[in-house]
Every structure is written in C-alpha cells, then in structure tokens.
Amino acid sequence: MPAKMQLTKGNEALAMGAIAGGCDCFFGYPITPQNEVPEVLSYEMPKRGRVFVQAESEVASINMVYGAAAAGKRAMTSSSSPGVSLMMEGLSYIACAELPCLIVNVMRGGPGLGSITPSQGDYFQACKGGGHGDYHSIVLAPWNVQEMYEFPALAFELADRYRCPAMILADGVLGAMMEPAIIADNAPPPTVPEKTWATNGRNGRAHKNVVNSLVIDPYGLRDHNLKLQAKYKKMQCETRWDTRDVDDAEILVVAYGISARLALSGCKLARKEGVKAGLLRPITLYPFPTEPIAECAANKKRVLVVELSAGQMVEDVRLAINGRVPVDFYGEMGGVIPSPVEICRKIVEAAQ
Amino acid sequence: MLEQTILAGFGGQGVLMMGKLLAQSAMEEGISATWLPSYGPEMRGGTANCIVVISDDEIGSPVSESYDAVVAMNQPSLEKFESKVRPGGTMLINKSIVPIKASRDDVEVYYVAANDIAEHECGSTQAANVVMLGALQSVRQKLKSHSIEKAIAYVFASKGQSVIDSNLKAFAAGMTSLHQNATAC
Amino acid sequence: MTTAMNQQDGTNRTPDTEQLVDLKCVFERPQALSDKPFHYCPGCSHGTYHRLIAEMIDEFGLLDRTVGICPVGCAVFAYEYFEVDMIEASHGRAPAVATGVKRSLPDRFVFTYQGDGDLASIGMGEIIHAAARGERITVFFVNNGIFGMTGGQMAPTSLLGQKTTTSVDGRDPRTTGHPIKVCELLSSLEGVAYLARVPLTSPKNINTCRKYMRKAIRAQTEDVGLGLVEVLSPCPVQWGMKPGDALHYIDETVVKAFPPGEFVDKLESPIKT
C-alpha cells in the first residue's frame, strides 16, 4: 500500500517508523509518556513475525537489546527519562562492544521521579555519554511527527554504519501530539549491511565470534578507546541541522526538538514586532553542528538558546561560538513549556 | 491564518475526539494542524482537554499563552480555561450542564445546549461534542464545513454508516443552534 | 600425542608407531573447548564445569549453533574457553542477554554460565523473570557460596556462620539474612522445565551432573522451558581450605543447606502453551 498522509500521534508514528526501519526486536518496560510505542509494537511486531518482549525492567530491556544486537538483529528499546537512566550501564557496554541498536528517550521532567510532562533535561546524559567511560551515541532530535516516523530508520542506518548505539531524543509533547504525517503502511524492508561479527552461532564459520566489553590489559583498552575515538571523529560528517529565516536575521535562536517549535513561533512573533529573528535547529545533537552554528552566528547581533532545561545544549552552543557573539539563554524546567510570547520578548530584548 | 483552540470537558464527553475532528478537517484541506492532549494522572481524574492549532503556514508551537477559541463542555473547564481566551476571542459553553455564566466581558461568549440538542437530534447525549463542533464552526469558520463533514465520515468510518449519519446530523444541528437560540454577550 | 612424547624426552627419536596405533584414545579435549589454559585457582571446579559443558555441546552436536553468555565473576573470561560464539554480559544480566539472543534466533542453543553473586544477588530479577517467561535457555549455575573474584566477600548463598571478608565473625542472619536457595525458589515458577542441584565433588557426582545437564539442555532443545543445573562448587582459596578439605566440606556441610537432587523435571510432560 502506498504511503499516505495520516493524522498520527508522535509515539505511534515512532513505532510504525521502527517497523519501516527494519526493527527486528523490541524490548521495553512501560513508562509515561511513551506508552503508545510498546503498545503499538506489541501488536504490530508479532503480526510480522518479529519479536516483542515486555521486559521486567529497563535494566533487563537494555540487556535484551544487547543480546539481540549481538545476534546481528536490528534491536531497540523505548523509555522515558528515569527508565533511560536505568539503561546507562547497558548502553556503556553496548558502546564498548560496538553494537548497533536504537534507544528512544521520550523525555519527561526530572530529576528523580520528576513529572510526566515534557522536558529536555537529558541532553547531557544523551550527548555526553551518560554511562561510564568515554563513549558517544549518535543522538537524533525530531521536532515533528513526520520526523518521529522517519528517524528510527535513519537511526538504525547510522547505528549499523558506525556500529554504535543511536538514540532518538524526543519529549512528552512530541510523543503525545498528533499531526498529519506521511506514513507507509508496508514500506519495503531496508537494506541491512552484513554483520560478520555477530554472535549468531558459528554455522560453518571457521572461527568463533565474541562480543565483549572487557579489555583487561591497559594498553589493549587504550587502543580500543583510540579506535572508538577515531570512529567518533569519522562520525562528524553525519551532522545534520535545519534553519528558518536565518539569512537576514539579527538574532539567531538555537533550539532543538519541541523547543525549536516554540522558538519558531517566537521568531515569527518577533518579526511581527520588527525584530528579524531566525532559527537554527540541530537535528543531530551528537555529532553536534558546531561549525554550522559558528558560521551562522558570525554576523548576528546576539544568539538566544531555548531549552526545556536549566541550560544544557547552551554549553555546546557557547563552545561553538567561542565568545565571538553574546549568547543568552532562556529555559523552563519541570515540565513547564516556555511560551512563544516569552521567547519573542527575549528576542526583542536581545535586539535592543 | 493561525487558529488556536482549547477543547475541554469531562473524560467521556469526547473532547479529544472533537479536537481530532478539527485537526483531521484541516488535513483534508491540506493545511497544517497539531493536536495535543493533556495526558497522565490528570486524565484519570476525569477531566480532559486538548489544544488544536491549525494554520496555512508551518506550525511552530502546538501550545499558546492565549487562545482564539475555548470550548468548555463542563463547569470545571470553564473555570480553568476562561482566562486563556485572548481578548476578542470566542468562548463556547455547554449550557446543558454548566449552570454558571462566563465572567469575561472582553470575549464573545456563546451558550449552546449541546447535550439537549444531541438528545433531541440523535437520541443520545453522546453526540454533544459534535453538536458543539458545529456551533464552533458556525462562529469561527476557519475551515470549510464540508471538510469537517468529510472528517466525520472518515473518523467514524469503522463504526458504520448509521453512526456517521447521526454525527452529521448532530454537526448540522450544532451549526444552526446559535442562529436560533444563542445569546452573544 | 606423538609430539608431546618427543618434546618430553628431548630427542628426535622416531616413536614406536606400531605401538601407538594400538593405543586407544580414551580422553581428549572436547571440540567445543578451546586449548587456552584455564586461569582458575587450584582446586576450583569452574574448569570441570566448563569441560562438562563443552562435552555436552559436542554430544548434542551443537557446536555450530550455540551462543553462550558469560557472567561477571571468576568465570568472566569463559568466552576464552569455548569454541562457540560467546557474549560477555554485564553483572547479573546474562538471562536478559540470553533472552535477546534466543528470541531473535529461536533455533540456536543459548546458554548462560553464572556464579552465585551474578545470578542470586545482582541478577536475581533477571533469572526469576526469564524463568517465569519460560525462556528456552539453559542456565549453568555455579554456587560456591562466596564472591571469589573480588576477594572472598559474603554471597547471598554463604552459609550461616560462614566467615568471609565482609562477615569476619561469620554470617549473622539477624543482619545479613539467610542463604538463598535458588532451585527451591525457582521451582514455583511455571516456566521452568528442569531444575537440579549437584555437588561437583566426586567422579560419581560429576556423572550425575552430566545426567542433569543433558536434561537441562533437552528442556531447551525440546522447547519445554528454562533448564538450570546448580553445581555446589568449592572455592578453596577464599574458603581458606585445602582443595581436598573443601570437597569434604561440601559433602558434609554445604549439602545440608543446599540439598542435591532434581527439583523440577517436566521433560516427560511438556508445557502446552
């Protein structure tokens, strides 16, 4: 059946996007606000002969993902902030063992049990490692339901290409909201690269395969780390970003995910008030669009970063701009959504 | 064009469905739409609301500080969202079960006996949400009525023709309700 | 064998081949076992259990379709010793990792190898739920009543009164609780197809262990449910005993807290799901 425009909920779009992206196995544990993801997949996966397991915890979920990814399958889990915290040990093992997989975080307010309302307080966790050791995941930040549908396939593709975990960093608004989106009911299966390293039984292979994150010799572990770091460097070419009305702008607003939606409205309101504002939206949070931000900000008066946090991505924006242009920050925490009117006010203030 | 609407009521009054019909209608017309529900424990408590934004431009924020229209299907919704209507905006109140009046004098307020009209036209209060949608359409007119009728046919398709017909009837009754007995303040 | 003889006497003398041809091979390394020397302490029975597992993989013809999951603990390097595909899991999570492998590749033989700290302490949640789900995996569980690798700390399976580096006056139930009996605990779960416990203390017991292991493997290959064999294993170094004394200690004392035998055997009446 051909792809068609459907009014679709973000979480449901993500689930269908995982199927279109060739997800073989889903393992997850219920947590608000992402419950439609496992609910849809519990029905849609077995129907297609694929694996769905409701695990006993997020700790078990990520380790099931580890097992299925080691077996060479496209495996994923989905959770929200507190659950993703529980997965961090497993994610570190996955990164060290160089297994491709997908972790979805539909962020909610924190710290602690926090709230179930939308937040972007997990940027540091997602982009700076999160678990122990020097590692990175590829981090994708959708900003509408269409991208919730398209990013699982992209995440799997990038994860397979670099043999690393990929994360989709969404939030409670993107998960719960509906928008028209083009959804393919029966997308053709994507091409998956051959995984000769997989621990899937020797089946005539002359040697055994081992998936491991234990390198007891310090020089051996250093060399493995150097290999990982070289890979992260190579990954920088995957940087993705998007802009709106930046060419003539005097104020540049940098925001990702739902914040970018709010910021876009803020920019439009500011233009009505005579202040030319433009938006730069990082799509990959790791690798981070450092150069594009630096270039785009170069001829601007000021830069405003908007987040649903106390200011996390703003640190990377400041590093990118390196003091050449003043950087302001506006954020809300705890599930409070910054209002476009307030963003507009900050833009107008910055322009004065 | 940018139209931001809050639809609120008890769980079971079909306010989320009302919002979906609006968003679906916008999609039928090929313009942008977002639908954002309240979610979590609040829903378990029995109140529900959703925010619908429609625009012929790319939609940024799916929420706003103030709204062009607020639909209150019950009294708690009126109390909670009355302050959210922008000056000059519109408020629709389900007078079948809301015994109080709005206190704002800088907005247009319409009182619609949505439950009574639904009962009279369709034999059940279930369609009160679609009656209210008709009333909203008659005063806001941001979408084509035909698009909403198409959306009703699409959304209720799985429930059979009689349900579609009943809802189309409720929508039509809602559309004319304010010409007959509405009080604009 | 010929090479070994030559090296032994240091000459290049041609061996008496006629005599060798008559020799019958009665003991050799299983195909599923690598030639890497074990790193285990003297008197430890991890090596014995590894060998038994490798024998079983050979016996069932599973070399080409086995995926093994290693624990964190003394057997953390178990992936070095088997000639099958191996995954190193994080501490306690082997049953979850095995679930991921088995669900995605149902025709493979999947086993976990876990110690008592791994399975009965940090990984208790994972083993209980894998058992409750009736995962078609086989668990080889080593209970030596102590944390061996980290230096002899108290384990959930340490006996009452047992002296360890974190219970220097002996395990006191008032502050540290009682030993967890894994087979007894899991036996109430419907998803379990086979459960048995055996001390690895004598050739006779090793043969009994083989018998139990066959059933635990069949529980998976015949699609019945989860199979687990718990071996009572000595840790002479951390127990502060000579290897021989450690074996006697198991036979005389440990078996009183952990009675050997078969706890669940559903192989005759497979679960209908």
Image (spheres, grey):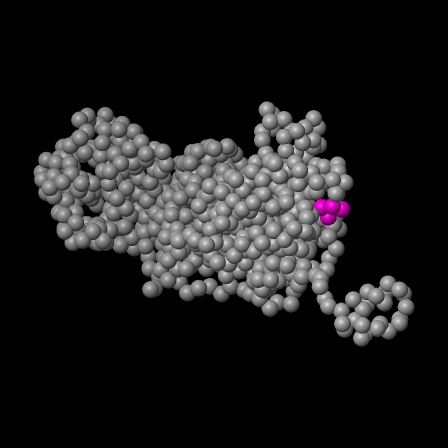
Circle count? 0
What are the residue bounds of the magenta stretch? Answer: C40-44
x, y percent for residue A296: 54, 49
Q: Which residue lies most toward the right here?
A: C11
Kindly identify the residue that appears in the image at 45 percent across and 50 percent down.
A53
Which corner quadrant holds the C terminus of chain B? top left
Residue B23 vs B7, above or below: the answer is: below
Q: Specify whether C6 is left or right of B144.
A: right
Of residues A139 and A97, the one drawn nearer to the viewer in this rendering? A97
Kindly identify the residue that appears in the image at 36 percent across and 45 percent down.
A177
x, y percent for residue B11: 26, 36
Q: Which residue lies most toward the top here?
A: C174
Kindly identify the residue that appears in the image at 38 percent across and 55 percent down.
A44
x, y percent for residue A46: 39, 56
Q: Specify whether C26 is left or right of A280.
A: right
The answer to whether residue B46 shows anywhere in this view is yes
Kindly identify the residue that appears in the image at 45 percent across and 38 percent down.
A108
Of residues A305 and B123, the one drawn nearer to the viewer in this rendering? B123
Of residues A293 and B11, the one drawn nearer to the viewer in this rendering? B11
Of residues A85 and A230, the one drawn nearer to the viewer in this rendering? A85
Residue A333 vs A18, above or below: the answer is: above
> Which of the 4 quarters of the picture holds residue C66?
bottom right
Q: Is residue B158 magenta?
A: no
> Which of the 4 quarters of the picture holds residue B114?
top left
> Which of the 4 quarters of the picture holds residue C6?
bottom right
